[in-house]
Image: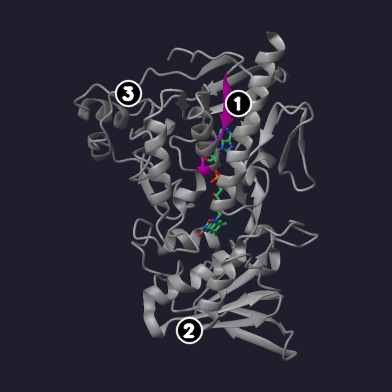
Amino acid sequence: MKAPIATCRTILVVGGGISGMTAAIEAAECAQEVILVERSPTLGGRTALLYRYFPKMCHPGCGLEINLRRLQGNRNVRVLTMTEVVRIEGKRGAYTATLKIRPRYVNENCNACGECASAVSDEIPNPYKYGHGKTKAAYLPFALAYPQRYVLDPSLIGTEDADKAQAACNVGAIDLTMQEQTVELAVGAVVWATGWKPYDAAKIQPYGYGRFPNVITSVEFERLADPNGPTGGKLLRPSDGREAKNIAFIQCAGSRDENHLRHCSRICCMATLKHTQYVREAHGDAAKSTGYYIDIRAIDRFEDFYQMVQKDATVTFVKSKVASIEQAENGDPVLYGVDTEGYHRYASAYDLVVLAIGMEPEANGIALPDDVITDSSGFIEGSADGGMLGAGSAASPLDVNRSVQSATGAALRAIKVIHQTVAEEA
Ligand SMILES: Cc1cc2nc3c(=O)[nH]c(=O)nc-3n(C[C@H](O)[C@H](O)[C@H](O)COP(=O)(O)OP(=O)(O)OC[C@H]3O[C@@H](n4cnc5c(N)ncnc54)[C@H](O)[C@@H]3O)c2cc1C
């Protein structure tokens, strides 16, 4: 692959979730050259892994599709998937970014016909289902993936299956000789839109995540409820495949806790309120959702959504920080704690427990340039010289709407950096 042409007037956007896509499009639509790099094989980020959006309960595909159409129609933006930033050197208006591009083993000829996937038998844990379910090792990440191009998992290379995939492709799209590449780019400003990751629930030892199969996280629950998820949208519990009708949701799992994440992740309350409606959708009046909470943080017009859920007879709220979870012999998780309104102890059994897990900055796991400043939780504030900016949930735990606003602001500030540099040079 040829290195993309970039200059000090180019904006580099790192991360192709809803925030990175937004920053790239907004800048490109202002006639700015943009390179958008995404680590995974597709754009969309974690938004693409949600079943529905609060507060309107529409499918995330709607918002993503609009952005994809804008991206595809704009010649100022160049998208590089399977690409990571290795290093950034220089200063505001004159950075050199070193990128590492991993091989996809599938070239631009791919028409997403799926013949390669049919030809191979090897399977891998599905990276788009939070470890639940498997996918063929030649796969399209999901229906709305962009680019609409299959990817071969590196474990296939050198196996008979790789040759079968190549033989099955009628358009010469499989290229087993592809190698990792390193390219250097000159860019004027950098927008970090690297997003968030779910806090590791296994670290909250008393809740038994990883030990008790019927204790899952909120992000896993999103996939469970989705017809494109591992259970075809049925709320089946992992231990025995039984339908889960009586479900407990634990708020602030890992958030607002000195031992875990100190910050409030802001969206977890709304995610749980939304999840109770997934249970209602699945089971109607037979559904039973119980939310254990410290306090419910439903800001702005989200309050309407909260009030709507409060009126739902299938939903009960218990003001309590759950102390611990044990597993009964039949696999039911049993919650122990004290209800701080009635001050009585409870030991309550459920079919399934969902931990409303906190949002941790993804940047906590990557090497950022030295001059990038982060807050005490690791969210990106930007660089001291103003040439690098944080956007969306990389900068703060935000819902989609606020991520888009943050990314639009970051795009504007990046454009300003470029224009100031050009003016200084003149
Ligand atoms: C359980 C749950 C339910 C939610 N439900 C809703 C909802 O209903 N409505 C709502 O508005 N919000 C919801 N949210 C919040 C929503 O998921 C976020 O607002 C959204 O994902 C933020 O998008 P983003 O682009 O900032 O980050 P992300 O979605 O995390 O995207 C970041 C992208 O950057 C890429 N990346 C990361 N590191 C690198 C790197 N080093 N190099 C290149 N690329 C990189 C990642 O692969 C990813 O594609 C929910 C959150 C949770 C936890």
Q: Which residues are magenta?
A: 10-18
Q: Secondary structure at mark 3?
A: loop
Residue 204, compared with residue 127, is above or below; it is: below
237 or 344: nearer the viewer: 344
- Amino acid of disc 3: Glu
Q: Residue 76 appears at what percent x and percent y?
A: 46, 23
* Total marks in image: 3
Q: Secondary structure at mark 2?
A: loop
Q: Is residue 41 visible?
A: yes
Quadrant for the C terminus, please: top right
Q: Residue 72 appears at what percent x and percent y?
A: 37, 31
Q: Residue furthest top?
A: 426
Residue at 61% from the left image edge and 60% from the top image edge: 267
In the rendered image, which residue does mark 2 sit on? Answer: 314
Q: Ligand 1 near label 1 (Cβ, under 8 Å)?
A: yes
Q: Label 3 neighbourhood size at 10 Å, few (<14), some (14-19), many (20+)?
A: few
In the rendered image, which residue does mark 1 sit on? Answer: 85
